[in-house]
């Protein structure tokens, strides 16, 4: 049980950081004028959203 609680805590911290990063990518993409660079940053944001979904799934499995 202790290991499970520690895993949950680590996944929650990871999820928090991933959400912050995703918000950062979205915010940055909104400020960019270069179309190609904007798309690259938006792509990073979409990838981060995928990581968020995976981490949420891990949290479900730990419960």
Image (cartoon, helix red, strand yellow):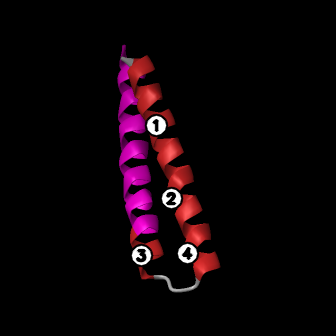
Dot 1 or dot 2, earlier in sequence: 2
Q: Which residue is mark 2?
A: 45
Q: Residues within 10 Å of mark 1 (few under 14, many from 20)?
A: few
Mark identifier at residue 53: 1
Instruction: Determine whether 44 is above or below 49 in the image.
Output: below
Q: Which residue is mark 3?
A: 30
Instruction: Determine whether 32 is above or below 19 in the image.
Output: below
From mark 1 to mark 2, how far is it between C-alphas? Answer: 13 Å
Q: Which quadrant would the N terminus be assigned to in this image?
A: top left
From mark 3 to mark 4, how far is it between C-alphas? Answer: 8 Å
From mark 1 to mark 4, how far is it between C-alphas? Answer: 23 Å
Q: Which residue is mark 4?
A: 38
- Mark 4: secondary structure: helix
Q: Quadrant of residue 4?
A: top left
Q: Name the spot of residue 24 as percent of width and height, x first.
A: 41, 67
Dot 3 or dot 2, earlier in sequence: 3
């Amino acid at each position: 049980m202790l290991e499970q609680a520690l895993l949950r805590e680590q996944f929650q911290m990871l999820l928090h950081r991933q959400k912050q990063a995703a918000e950062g990518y979205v915010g940055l993409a909104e400020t960019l004028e270069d179309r190609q660079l904007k798309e690259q940053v938006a792509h990073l944001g979409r990838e981060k959203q995928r990581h968020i979904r995976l981490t949420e799934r891990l949290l479900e499995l730990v419960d």
